[in-house]
């Protein structure tokens, strides 16, 4: 089942937990803020996946200290 990841880059405090936990879906930019790999957008980085790895993406989202990541 496909799912969408949305990173609120305004809320992100660049801690690195999400892309350290799940580098298949998240990466740090030049300021260490998170963005979705292959995603679109800037203020909000959004990407869709259908890779059977939603659990990994969700685990990273649950680890975010400022709840900047939404999976739907
Ligand atoms: S875990 Fe949250 S605050 Fe940390 S880099 Fe990822 S989106 Fe940003």
Image: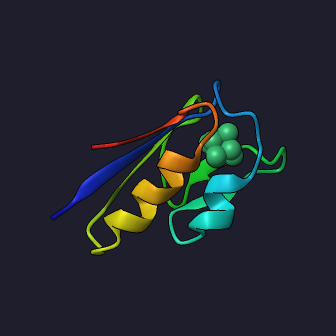
**Place of residue 14 in the rendered image (x, y in percent of width and height, measured from the top left):** 77, 41
Compared with 45, 8 (above or below) is above
Which residue is depicted at the point 60% across and 49% down? 35
- 55 left or right, relative to 22: left
Compared with 17, 68 (above or below) is above
**Place of residue 13 in the rendered image (x, y in percent of width and height, measured from the top left):** 75, 34
> Which quadrant would residue 27 be assigned to in this image?
bottom right
Which residue is depicted at the point 62% across and 30% down? 66
- 55 left or right, relative to 44: left
**Place of residue 64 in the rendered image (x, y in percent of width and height, measured from the top left):** 59, 43
Which residue is depicted at the point 21% across and 61% down? 2
Image quadrant in which the C terminus is located: top left
Return the residue found at the far top.
Answer: 10
Compared with 24, 28 (above or below) is above
In this view, the residue in front, 35 or 71, is 71
Return the residue found at the far right.
Answer: 31
In this view, the residue in front, 22 or 28, is 22
User: How many numbered marks appear?
Assistant: 0
Which residue is depicted at the point 61% across and 55% down? 18
Image quadrant in which the N terminus is located: bottom left
**Colour convention of the picture:** rainbow
**Place of residue 20 in the rendered image (x, y in percent of width and height, measured from the top left):** 69, 64
Ligand 1, image quadrant it occupies: top right
């Amino acid at each position: 089942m496909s799912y969408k990841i949305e990173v609120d880059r305004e809320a992100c405090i660049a801690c690195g937990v999400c892309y350290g936990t799940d580098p298949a879906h998240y990466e740090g930019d030049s300021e260490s803020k998170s963005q979705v790999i292959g995603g679109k957008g800037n203020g909000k980085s959004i990407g869709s996946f259908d890779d059977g790895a939603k659990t990994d993406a969700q685990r990273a989202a649950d680890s975010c200290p400022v709840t900047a990541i939404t999976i739907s």
